Amino acid sequence: MNPALFEAALKRITRLFGEDATGHDVHHTLRVYRMAMRIAESEGADRELVGLAAMLHDADDPKLFGGGDGLPNARAFMEEQGISPAQAEAICMIIGEVSFSKNGAKRPSTLEGLVVQDADRLDAIGAIGIARTFAFGGNRGQALHDPDRDTGTSIAHFHEKLLKLKNLMNTDEARRIAEERHRYMEAFLAEFHAEWNGIR
Ligand code: ADP
Ligand code: NI
């Protein structure tokens, strides 16, 4: 992706995210960007669309910036940068379609959307995914685990969402990466429960 545009986007999201501790820091976005570019390469997706959509994919996250579907932060940035209205529209469509919470299991309608969604989902699993889950849970004040509850704890979140993501990957490259990260999470959960139950 164009280096000047990348730098401008980085500056903007750094300002927007500030000191957020819910897992939507600038580093999440940069990991998603790098992963999306890697998957775009192997899938032959449009790298400009994927790059900019990845950089802006959480710039209007309702958990940080309140409601509204208009993506005002992403749109304002692209207008300032002289992105054409058609290109901006395509990027907003990608961003709108990648969100798990908004779209459930619905698949994005473009290759670029599929790629960015995979990159975003990959960042929710594996070692980083584990760390983000407990950071999110701590920020919310929820328990690590409660053997009597299958919702509302960080361990419950693995079963509610994270362990399902492997089978929801859109691209072959993401599926390969997800397999490994999935195994790592299963090993973590086995160890967690063994320690919890005093077996190890
Ligand atoms: P994104 O928008 O990047 O897909 P989310 O906003 O859904 O991610 O969540 C941010 C991070 O917090 C992710 O790693 C996600 O797995 C984690 N998370 C979301 N909901 C919960 C929850 N109820 N308990 C623990 N972790 C959560
Ligand atoms: Ni994200």
Image: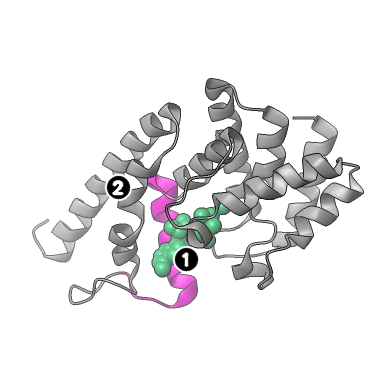
Rendered image: mark on residue 196: none
- The quarter holding residue 158 reads bottom left
Which residue is nearer to you in this view: 136 or 97? 97
Some atom of ligand 1 lies within 8 Å of the CB belonging to the residue at label 1: yes
How would you classify the magenta stretch by its main secondary structure?
Answer: helix
Instruction: Decide if residue 24 is on the left or right side of residue 104.
Output: right
Task: Residue 140: say if magenta.
Answer: yes
Instruction: Decide if residue 45 is on the left or right side of residue 175.
Output: right
Give the residue type that dot 2 points to. Met
The residue stretch that appears in magenta: 125-144
Colour treatment of the image? one colour
**Outermost residue toward the left in this view:** 199
On screen, residue 155 above or below 46: below
Give the residue type that dot 1 points to. Phe
Quadrant of the image containing the N terminus: top right
Which residue is nearer to you in this view: 19 or 55? 55
Residue in the image at 12% along x and 56% along y: 200
Q: Earlier in the sequence, mark 1 or mark 2?
A: 1
Mark 2 element type: helix
Rendered image: mark on residue 185: 2
Residue in the image at 28% along x and 59% along y: 159
- The quarter holding residue 174 reads top left
Task: Residue 5: say if magenta.
Answer: no
On screen, residue 86 above or below 176: below
Instruction: Decide if residue 168 is on the left or right side of residue 45.
Output: left
Instruction: Decide if residue 26 is on the left or right side of residue 175.
Output: right
Q: Which residue is mark 1?
A: 136
